[in-house]
Image (tube, rainbow, N blue to C red):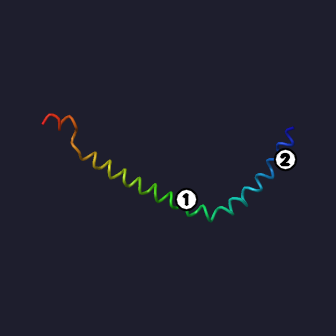
Amino acid sequence: MQSSGSQSATPTTHRIPSLMAATDTRGKHRIQAELQRLEQEARFLEEELEQLERMEKASAACNE
């Protein structure tokens, strides 16, 4: 039974590179768009963090 499992795994690994090559051109744009979205979100979060660091503490504002 182990030999049939290893035989079935071999053709699958041979198909993966050809499948990746076929979807690579469509996937590049999607990956690039996702990367740009993540970079934009990171910039937004960094700006929000800077604003929070500049704000005074809530306890100090409540005392006034």
Q: Would you name the residue on which mark 2 appears?
A: 7
Asked if marks 1 and 2 touch (Cβ < 8 Å), the reply is no
- How dense is the environment of label 1, judged by Cα within 10 Å: few (below 14), some, or many (20 and up)? few
Task: Name the mark nearer the viewer: 1 or 2.
Answer: 1
Q: Would you name the residue on which mark 1 appears?
A: 31
Q: Residue at x 79, y 47 (%)?
A: 9
Above/below status of 58 relative to 19: above
Q: Earlier in the sequence, mark 1 or mark 2?
A: 2
Which of the image's four quarters has the N terminus?
top right
Residue 20, quarter of picture: bottom right
| Residue 32 percent location from the top left of the image | 52, 61
Report helix, strand or loop for mark 1. Answer: helix
Amino acid marked by disc 1:
Ile
Amino acid marked by disc 2:
Gln
Asked if residue 36 lies left or right of residue 51, the reply is right
| Residue 60 percent location from the top left of the image | 18, 36
| Residue 47 percent location from the top left of the image | 32, 52
| Residue 31 percent location from the top left of the image | 55, 59
Q: Residue at x 46, y 54 (%)?
A: 38
